[in-house]
Amino acid sequence: MRPTSSRVAVLQLFHEFPTEHMTADQVFRRVPPDTEQCSLASVYRALAQLLEAGLISNAWIGEQRVVYELNRGTRHSHLVCNDCGAIRDIDDGELETQHAAIAAAREFSYTSASLVIFGRCSQCAAALEAGGRRAALRTAIQRVE
Ligand SMILES: [Zn+2]
Ligand SMILES: [Zn+2]
């Protein structure tokens, strides 16, 4: 059987995980090993071709990190957790309308926006609070001893 081309393998991967954001490196590590000429360079080439074809989209998420995801037809922004790196989509039509309005007010025709909101996800916030509570309890115990 002829090995799948890296372009097909990469696109299949995005269809397998339609809501996931992956860096080029993560894509490379998840592409099946029997893929034809599978190298990081060929993955980058495949990503560029799929982007060009509008089948996937990409987003800059800070610190030189670019993630790719399946193009589901709606433009969206992202929330990124500073602690664990989790990426959430912001599917907010109002926000898109606002981007277009901001551009229009300055005589720009709107094509796209790249908005990333950085913060701490609820899981990390809960973990931090639990850690804080544990530390407080430790201090309290030491005081009693
Ligand atoms: Zn987090
Ligand atoms: Zn996204």
Image: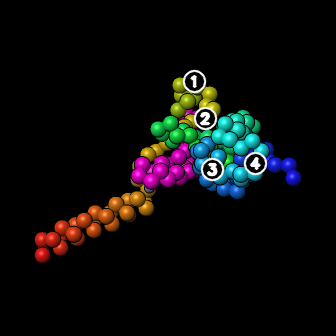
Visible residue check, residue 51: no
Give the class, few, some or many, for how many residues have Cα within 10 Å of label 2's Cα (few <14, many ≥20).
Answer: few
| Front disc: 4 or 1 | 4
Lower position in the chain sequence, tag 4 or tag 2: 4
In the structure shown, which secondary structural element does the residue marked by tag 1 occupy?
loop
Extent of the magenta region: 76-101
Q: Which residue is mark 1?
A: 107
Q: Looking at the picture, tell me which residue is in the foreground, 81 or 134.
A: 134
- Measure the C-alpha gap from mark 3 to mark 2: 29 Å
Q: Looking at the picture, tell me which residue is in the foreground, 96 or 2.
A: 2
Give the class, few, some or many, for how many residues have Cα within 10 Å of label 3's Cα (few <14, many ≥20).
Answer: some
In the structure shown, which secondary structural element does the residue marked by tag 2 occupy?
loop
Lower position in the chain sequence, tag 3 or tag 2: 3
Q: Which residue is mark 2?
A: 112
Label number found at residue 35:
4
Q: Look at 46% across and 45% down and name the residue there.
A: 117
- Measure the C-alpha gap from mark 4 to mark 2: 33 Å
- Image quadrant where residue 94 sits: top right
- Measure the C-alpha gap from mark 3 to mark 1: 44 Å
Q: Amino acid at mark 3?
A: Arg
| Front disc: 1 or 2 | 2
Q: Amino acid at mark 4?
A: Thr
Visible residue check, residue 107: yes
